[in-house]
């Protein structure tokens, strides 16, 4: 089995209805990070058992109501990942929740095995920090909805990245697979959505490569609902093909006691950051905000 076959999971390849995508620590071969994507028909409800993992309910498209521990949270959601920064719900470990949707939709459930049981809560879109990172054709938007300093969690780190067509993100290539003063050991999931073009689905590309002592070699053409697993190694760039905006959801967790996101650039390519000082941020950014926008506005 090649690295591409093992770590690039095409859309539908892990489906277990009502979940369109299922990645668990067991199926990924690691210890902490997980992701399910729940699909609900209009009027449908689904019970969710979080088990030993804190979990988020993050709309990809559609709205929902989440009931957990005697609380009921109404989530406005969005028409698609390319139209709005969304609100979401945090579910603690050892919880039984019900997710229901009057209009139907798809809902990402990023998760991380953890020890502490925190309180469930509703998280408004207006509280999500939107960061414009990079410059020129390395410009991208990062929605830091579940990063250290933004949302209190035990182990889970998650964010959304939107990359305009023709741009590169997750660049320079970087890694976080060692516990050092400048790096954290974090398993990572990339879940992709690609904007459609006038004649059908769009495409993007993802690169992952290893160090001499820990080889991994992935170069994948990605489409909507594809997933790439990154147990270790340098990852990036994530490439948005011309004409197709690229979205990915990052889900990270690891064994360290400190919940932190520290990375190390590939020393062969880290110099690129120094070139950004003389470049403007791509004027197409931000692609989304808390205001819903039409697909035709992109």
Image (cartoon, grey):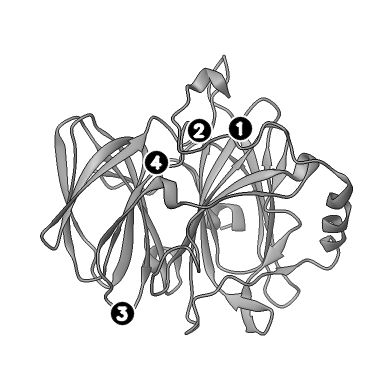
For label 3, the residue is 116
Q: Nearer the viewer, mark 3 or mark 1?
A: 3
Marked residue nearer the N-terminal end (3 or 1): 3
- Specify the label residue 12 is tagged with: 4
Q: Nearer the viewer, mark 1 or mark 2?
A: 2
Marked residue nearer the N-terminal end (1 or 2): 2
75 relative position to 265: left or right: left
Are the residues flagged by discs 1 and 2 in contact, CB closer than 8 Å? Answer: yes
Separation of residues labelled 3 and 1 (CA atoms): 37 Å
Marked residue nearer the N-terminal end (3 or 2): 2
Separation of residues labelled 4 and 2 (CA atoms): 21 Å
Separation of residues labelled 3 and 2 (CA atoms): 34 Å
The residue positioned 68% from the left and 33% from the top of the image is 241
Separation of residues labelled 1 and 4 (CA atoms): 21 Å
For label 2, the residue is 82
Q: Is residue 172 above or below residue 61?
A: below
Q: Residues within 10 Å of mark 3 (few under 14, many from 20)?
A: some
Q: At numbered mark 3, what does the secondary structure look like: helix, strand or loop?
A: loop
Q: At numbered mark 4, what does the secondary structure look like: helix, strand or loop?
A: loop
Marked residue nearer the N-terminal end (1 or 4): 4
The residue positioned 54% from the left and 24% from the top of the image is 196
Separation of residues labelled 3 and 4 (CA atoms): 33 Å
- Specify the label residue 245 is tagged with: 1
């Amino acid at each position: 089995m090649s690295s591409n076959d093992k770590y690039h999971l095409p859309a539908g390849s892990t489906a277990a209805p009502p979940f369109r995508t299922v990645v668990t620590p067991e199926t990924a071969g690691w210890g902490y990070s997980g992701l399910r994507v729940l699909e609900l028909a209009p009027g449908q409800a689904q019970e969710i058992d979080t088990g030993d993992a804190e979990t988020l309910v993050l709309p990809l498209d559609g709205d929902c109501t989440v009931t957990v521990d005697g609380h009921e949270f109404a989530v406005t959601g969005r028409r698609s990942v390319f139209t709005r920064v969304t609100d979401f719900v945090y579910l603690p470990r050892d919880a039984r929740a019900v997710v229901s949707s009057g209009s139907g939709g798809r809902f990402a459930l990023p998760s991380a095995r953890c020890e502490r049981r925190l309180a469930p809560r509703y998280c408004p879109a207006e509280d999500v920090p939107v960061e414009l990172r990079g410059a020129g054709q390395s410009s991208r938007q990062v929605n830091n909805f579940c990063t250290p300093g933004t949302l209190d969690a035990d182990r889970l780190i998650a964010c959304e990245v939107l990359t305009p067509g023709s741009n590169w993100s997750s660049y320079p290539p970087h890694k976080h697979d060692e516990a050092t003063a400048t790096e954290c050991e974090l398993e990572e999931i990339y879940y992709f959505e690609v904007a459609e073009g006038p004649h059908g689905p769009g495409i993007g590309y993802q690169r992952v490569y290893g160090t001499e002592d820990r080889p991994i070699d992935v170069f994948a053409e990605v489409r909507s609902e594809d997933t790439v697993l990154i147990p270790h190694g340098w990852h990036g760039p994530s490439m948005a093909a011309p004409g197709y905006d690229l979205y990915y959801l990052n889900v990270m967790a690891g064994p360290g006691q400190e919940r932190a996101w520290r990375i190390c650039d590939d020393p062969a390519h880290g110099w690129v950051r120094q070139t950004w000082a003389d470049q403007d941020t791509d004027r197409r950014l931000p692609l989304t905000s808390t205001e819903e926008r039409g697909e035709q506005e992109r």
